[in-house]
Amino acid sequence: MRRLILGTFPLFLSGLLSCSHIVILHDPLTAEEHNDLGVTYEQKGEMNAAIREYNAALRKRKDFPTARVNLGNAYFSKKDYPRAEQQYSTVLQTDSANTDAGNNLAMVYLETGKHLDQALRLAERCVRLASQNARYHDTLGLVCAKLKLPEKARDSFQRALGLIPQDDSDLRREVESHLRSVP
């Protein structure tokens, strides 16, 4: 009898090993938890994992603009500008006042060199809606510099510098560099 049991064990084991995929019947994480996990992956530079988590968040809650903007940011980091543009545009279709989506879409247009007139309108709207955000002023300055509007670019960079907290030396150096590059 012992021989029979040992003889069938390898067959049983090979049957288990042939089922090499795991099936999750219920995803225990909320949309917010998937989004937070995506942010963690993004901070570690693991963009594919971040994209997977942002998509999981959006499957759970389609109307989750934060996750959609974050998904756009991950695509932007990978220089997948068409997908980034799609995510930001989707947010703006339902919330035209979403300044993060508007600013980041302006950055997509700036990076691709397309729709610069639209980038200018988006950046100006973001500055109007969130006038205390240094990054939005910096984006406006970059767009103006690209459009060869040096006075407006310098003014935007100066405003950005005035809004940067003292402890954010990285952003300060970045904006100062942009200001120095304006003829």
Image: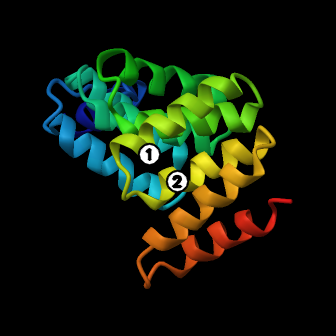
Where residue 65 appears, as percent x and y from the top left, is 29, 31
Answer whether labels 1 and 2 touch (C-beta < 8 Å).
yes
Q: How many marks?
A: 2
Where residue 70 appears, as percent x and y from the top left, is 41, 40
Where residue 154 appears, as percent x and y from the top left, is 68, 60
Which is nearer the N-term, disc 1 or disc 2? 1
User: Is 72 situated above or below 91?
Assistant: below
Q: What residue is drawn where x is 61% and y is 39%?
A: 107
Q: What residue is drawn where x is 30% and y is 38%?
A: 66
Residue furthest out toward the bottom? 167
Where residue 15 appears, as percent x and y from the top left, is 35, 24
Packing grade of label 1 (10 A; few <14, some 14-19, many >=20) is many
Residue 64 shows which numbered tag?
none
Residue furthest out toward the front? 151
Quarter of image, res 9 = top left
Q: What residue is drawn where x is 74% and y is 24%?
A: 114
Which part of the image, by quadrant, shows the N terminus? top left
User: Which kind of residue does numbered mark 2 sit on?
Assistant: His
Quarter of image, res 10 = top left
Residue wearing tag 1 = 127
Residue wearing tag 2 = 137
User: Which kind of residue does numbered mark 1 sit on?
Assistant: Val
Distance in Å between CA atoms under marks 1 and 2: 6 Å
Q: Is residue 108 left or right of residue 62?
A: right
